[in-house]
Amino acid sequence: MRRRDFIALGSAAAAWSIEARAQQLALPVVGFLGSDSPELYTDRLRAFRRGLKDAGYIESENVAIEYRWANGDNNLLPALAAELVSLRAAVLVSSTTPAALALKAATASIPIVFFTAGDPIALGLVGSLNRPGANITGTTALTLEAGKKSLQLLQETVPSATEFAALINPTSPNLAEAQTKDLQAAARALNLQIDFLNASTEREFQTAFAKIAELHAGGLVISSDSFFFAHIEQLAALAEQNKVPAIFGFREFPVAGGLMSYGADLADQHRTMGGYVGRILKGEKPGDLPVQQSIKVQLVLNLKAAKTLGITLPQTLQVAADEVIE
């Protein structure tokens, strides 16, 4: 190839690259803020993109998505939220409660679509579920009497126990306070005693499980916190090692070897979020879109974990379960 031709080809390639970059920059930008690492979000992101596609948007074709990950460190969220705001994103998305609160604190004008495991009103995210107002809406895994149901499932599993424990992350104060109140009310309604244990580092997991043994608690409710989700395999292993029947709000827990989970279908929630982002990109106001509460709640049991723990899950629970892992 002659040098002149090579230069011409190189110039054309550079021009195409600049043009492609300009086209990409012209796409509306969605900023996605995650508390953990992307590896933990594979199913949720797939569902989110499916919701976007259903609304007419495909990543890198007619919408660009900028991702920021805190990798389990909630202290990084405010700076990451500010970075996404500086990109002048058309819509901001959060996949956890701490991320939602960080985005809300970062902007009062850019539309926000959130997911939270807690009550978005109690958390201060919205003033109303039907008419959230302002620049924010989203989905919640909150189900009526979720704490009571989790405790009730443990009580059915260990009927001789009258005392249980709950694991709370104090570095997520809004969510921790809301879930503590929920579980306290549940314990009173079921005539049970509940002890609250704090953990915000991996080292504190060991301390918490040692305390459960001291308390002779019949089981453990793990609060639906993103930090605990990021360490789901470690928590499942500790529950097995310490012979503690435990329940978490996410299916990934029994899949990782934990005993049971009761909570919303995260993929379904994120597909709804993707649809909401699409509607906002088309001109709808987030404050006019009602916060969607989970209607798809799953009970998942792990029979192998039960056998390891030396307990027999009641047949009534096995029949009622949406999924039984053997």
Image (cartoon, grey):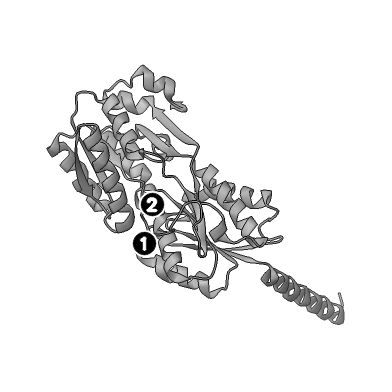
> Quarter of the image containing the N terminus?
bottom right
The percent position of residue 185, horizontal first and vertical second, equals 25, 41
Mark sitting earlier along the chain (2/1)? 1
The percent position of residue 31, horizontal first and vertical second, equals 55, 64
Local secondary structure at mark 1: helix
Residue linked to disc 2: 226
Local secondary structure at mark 2: helix
Q: Which of the pair 166/302 is nearer the observer?
A: 166
- Residue type of the residue flagged with mark 2: Ser
Quadrant hosting residue 240: top left
The percent position of residue 138, horizontal first and vertical second, equals 51, 54
Residue linked to disc 1: 74
Residue 311 sits above or below residue 45 on the image: above
Residue 238 visible in this rendered orientation of the protein: no
Q: Residue at x 51, y 72 (%)?
A: 85
Residue 325 sits above or below residue 235 on the image: above
Q: Residue at x 21, y 42 (%)?
A: 209
Q: Pointer 2: residues within 10 angstroms few (<14), some, or many (20+)?
A: many
Find out whether the residues at labels 2 and 1 contact each other: C-beta distance under 8 Å: yes
Answer left or right for 145 relative to 11: left
- Residue type of the residue flagged with mark 1: Asn
**Outermost residue toward the top?**
315
Q: Residue at x 27, y 55 (%)?
A: 200
**Outermost residue toward the left?**
214
Q: Which of the pair 68/107 is nearer the observer?
A: 107
